[in-house]
Amino acid sequence: MTDEPVIEVEDLWLSRKGEVILEGINLRVLQGDFFAIIGPNGGGKTTLLKVILGLIPPDRGTIRILGGLPGDKRHLLGYVPQLRTFDFNYPLSVREMVLSGLLGRKTGIFKTFNDADYRLADKALSTMGVAHLADRTIRNLSGGEQQRVVIARALVGDPKVLLLDEPTVFVDTPTETQFYDILGNLARSMTIVLVTHDIGVIISHVTKVACLNHRLYTHDSKELTEDMIQGAYKCPVDIIAHGHPHRVLRQHPPEE
């Protein structure tokens, strides 16, 4: 890891229909970081990723990706949206699914793939340990296998930064554990920004954590402090341990 920033967000604001979604966001992700962003549903986590990707323009604030504008550096970012956004019933092969990650780089009406593209797809599949599934239909895979293929799709363009949005929502615990091991290996060669709810699991893998609930709370480390959790979740917390140090919310008193 170096002190060279790959993502810089300064005083970012975004509103929709009169509601503030992102409020004064400041974020600095360095080269080699494995950065996790946690927070409650509706707190703006997915929106922040889309702003970083240049898919949603902010009301004000600045975003720099490797020193440039998001639109100009989009090809250096790999993006894994939530799995529910994919239609896995579409009759695509695994290799075709991964190749679709290169469509944004193709020009012209008829977008075709060459031998170099196929080599990139096979390399990405091999990285994710699913090269043997290349000719299978995507809908015939398990949830964990589909997850790996979707990440291979994001890796096919050889990105410098990988952004993942809740990638373990629809997978079981053993698959989730294997998944974080894979991400740990990927983090040796690229910067990763991960949006997740898996507070307990991520602590042993990531280098930095931030809590987001419209406003961003971080201490530029992997430590989850009580003020960060309280600021984001608006709840007191306890520290407990189940193999990994983590924090959970105390049970709320019943509503009257």
Image (cartoon, rainbow, N blue to C red):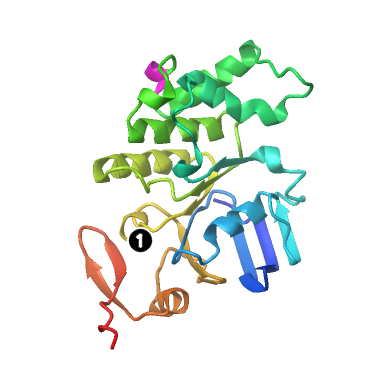
**Which is nearer the eye, 91 or 39?**
91
Give me the residue at 31% from left, 39% from top: 178
Region rendered in magenta? 129-133
Label 1, on which residue?
Answer: 199
Give me the residue at 63% from left, 68% from top: 26
Please tell me whether the stretch drawn in magenta is mainly helix, strand or loop.
helix
From the image, which quarter does the C terminus lie in?
bottom left
Residue 230, by quadrant, is: bottom left
Q: Can residue 10 be seen in this view?
A: yes
Give me the residue at 50% from left, 42% from top: 85
Q: At which x and y percent is residue 98?
A: 53, 25
Q: At which x and y percent is residue 193?
A: 52, 51
Pick out the residue farthest to the top: 115
**Which is nearer the eye, 200 or 143?**
143
Does residue 255 belong to the magenta stretch? no
Q: What element carries label 1?
A: helix
Q: At which x and y percent is residue 90?
A: 48, 26
99 sits left or right of 142 in the view: right
Pick out the residue farthest to the bottom: 256
